[in-house]
Image (spheres, rainbow, N blue to C red):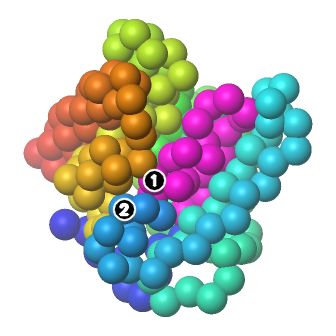
Amino acid sequence: MKKFFNSIQILCAGIGGRGVLLASTLLMDSAIRKDVYAIGSDEYGMSQRGGSVVSLVKVGKVKSPFIGKGNADIILGFEESEFLRNLSYLKIGGIAVVNSPKETYESKVKEALNKRKISVYTLDADGIAREGGLYQASNMAILGFFSSLNIEPFTYENLKGAILERLKGKMVEKNLLVFERGFELGREIVQCMNL
């Protein structure tokens, strides 16, 4: 299990209608479930019209919800272009989970990622959500994948518990199905990387 000392800073980047704000709320819920202090801040303008949405989540020994450039431990990119736009916020050695059908990036982007020792995991979260019959649940696929990295307090069990507590009605089952598929894909990729 990976542990971060004192705090974790997560930047969630996407566009309106992709579930960025719900995902950040679930991240904070999962921290609170483990009695870890969590604070967040959202930045969105024309989010209902597909504009940029950035949600900042910090857990642990933190005082301010804001994340400066080069300080985020993790970026969850709900839209590939928004991940690239916010890449400067990710610290050297950081982790990114990105919604993208591509398995790799063009040489200049790849070179920049390698130079900064950034671990990037890509998954077709939109495709996973469509397969689950719920296109707008790509956020759940990303959270499921992220949980496979086993970073406390964002483990599979804890995030799944947060989803069950936060979501209500008929959509819970489909959201969980997409979450589970993201987790399984992440677990497969992480196991292959550790071989």
| Res 53 → quadrant | top right
Vertical placement of residue 25 versus 14, above or below: below
Residue type, mark 2 in image: Ser
Residue placed at 25% from the left, 32% from the top? 180
Quadrant for the C terminus in the image: top left
- x, y percentage for residue 57? 57, 65
- x, y percentage for residue 29? 42, 62
Instruction: Give the structural element (helix, strand or loop) at label 2.
Output: helix
Is residue 92 among the parts visible in the rendering? no
In the rendered image, residue 11 lying in the magenta stretch gets the answer yes
Residue type, mark 1 in image: Leu
Q: Mark 1 highlights which residue?
A: 26
- x, y percentage for residue 185? 26, 31
| Res 2 → quadrant | bottom left
Residue placed at 26% from the left, 37% from the top? 183
- x, y percentage for residue 41? 69, 65
User: For mark 1, does the 10 Å Cα neighbourhood hold few (<14), some (14 to 19), or many (20 or more) residues?
Assistant: many
Q: Nearer the viewer, residue 12 or 94?
A: 12
The label shown at residue 159 is none
Residue placed at 31% from the left, 44% from the top? 164
Q: Residue furthest toward the front?
A: 169
* Residues at marks 2 and 1 touching, judged by CB atoms closer than 8 Å: yes
In the image, 137: left or right of 193? right
Q: Residue furthest toward the left?
A: 195
Is residue 22 among the parts visible in the rendering? yes
Instruction: Give the structural element (helix, strand or loop) at label 1.
Output: helix
Q: Mark 2 highlights which residue?
A: 30
Q: Nearer the viewer, residue 187 or 144?
A: 144
- Range of residues picked out in magenta: 10-27
